[in-house]
Image: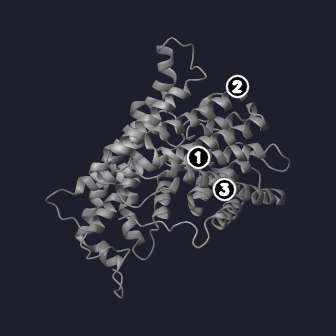
Amino acid sequence: MSLSADPRSPAPGAAPPDPAVVVRTSGYLKLLALAAVLGVLIAAAAYGFLALVSKVQSMTYTDLPKALGFHGTPPWWPLPLLGVAGLLVGVTVRYLPGTGGHEPAEGLSTTGAPGAIELPGVFLAALATLGLGAVLGPEAPLIALGGGLAVLAVKGPSRDVPPQVVAVVGAAGSFAAVSTLLGSPLLGAFLLMEASGLAGSMLGVVLVPGLLAAGLGSLIFIGLGSWTGLGTYSLALTSVPHADRPDIAEFGWALVIGAAAALLGTGIRRSALLLKARVERHRMPATVVTGLAVAGSAIAYSEATGKDAVDVLYSGQSAMGPLLAGHAGYSAGALVLLVVCKSLAYCASLSAFRGGPVFPAMFVGATGGMALSHLAGLPLTAAFAMGIGGMSVALLRLPMTSVLLATLLLGADGLTVMPLVIVSVVVAYVLTLRLGPRGGGPKAPAARG
């Protein structure tokens, strides 16, 4: 791809490159072919990472207690599990290059692929975080690992690769790594596009290689899921209650849920940033203590409700479907306590561990919406969707992605409640920005590369 400057950042006073001219070049066709090859390879690597995380979760939470002679998982088991997680993450962040990846308390980072020397730290910190019970998701580590591996494949000591090519290849690797994680390759691509601030006349030129990598990556995930019998590790709901067309009362609830999500999301993020500053001063002991706090929240919820501590532990990605399908087994009080304990564990995890903020935010919002659905005039499916949208935008500051996360997940019923979700997301987004620091609010996302 023979461009003299980054197509998203033309020199001052210079006309931006013509997309039609760029697409006709042989270099761009080579870039598409490279994105296709990398999409296949990185999607396979991402699938292997997710399979490894799932295996570590089952081995440490279920298999290990049985091997030690316990009948089932003892209620106190999250304490040693999260203590070890804190120790491993603390050692990785302190001693390995790259501090284990980006700080999740700062939001979803798409500021560029990590260097080759940083990839082991990102991998180990994410595996300890996700596999041993901290409340963060796999999307941020996959974005970093996918982009880093793609850049590593094209760069070398003797290769002079233009920065814009490195940026596009890194983005394609990230697209492939999260291709089906959110349920659709298009949704994963949209998340990366909005988070990176990608725009302008060259949007399609830069985006097409990423979409190609995501599409092929999705096929790899599906193929490996069928071949191995492990599934695709894609966010999905198998049982969604029917949603009727919204009425005026539900639009009133959209305002309430949006406001509540903004308040709760702002509280979680501000508390996480305050804790993060303290964790950084005493990295290893503080990360262990933070892990024990996550475990304590899970144990308190389990002892108070009789439910499994897994409801609080982990990202919530695989727990949302069973929670919605088994909603009749949760009282309003149990759901409120789950929101409180999951939020505390999420806040603590954001401050010290390494992972993504998307899935826990969705889970907290979904649970809060389900709790409110016990009140008059608020159907379950609408409340579930509005809660996801409101909390997602409160933590991610990505309004379009938040609407899509809440609606595409629900299939046809998601389209029915989309107007409610939009109202909830807009209210939460505006209030979140107003509740943020004066003089600027959140930082604008940096473009990849």
Q: Which mark is residue 390?
A: 3
Q: Amino acid at mark 2?
A: Gly
Q: Is residue 125 left or right of residue 120?
A: right
Residue 47 visible in the displayed image: no
Where does label 1 land, which residue? 347
Q: Which mark is residue 306?
A: 2
Element type at marker 3? helix
Q: Is residue 243 left or right of residue 276?
A: right
Q: Earlier in the sequence, mark 2 or mark 3?
A: 2
Residue 251 visible in the displayed image: yes
Where 175 falls versus 71 (above or below)?
below
Q: Earlier in the sequence, mark 1 or mark 2?
A: 2
- C-alpha span from label 2 to label 3: 29 Å
Q: Position of residue 263 (x, y in %)?
A: 70, 56
- C-alpha span from label 1 to label 3: 17 Å
Q: Amino acid at mark 3?
A: Gly
Element type at marker 1? helix
- C-alpha span from label 1 to label 2: 23 Å
Q: Position of residue 127 (x, y in %)?
A: 41, 38
Along the viewing direction, whichever of 183 and 139 lies nearer the viewer: 139
Along the viewing direction, whichever of 74 and 95 lies nearer the viewer: 95
Q: Amino acid at mark 1?
A: Cys
Q: Position of residue 291 (x, y in %)?
A: 52, 36
- Residue 417: name its quadrant: bottom right
Where 38 falls versus 87 (above or below)?
below
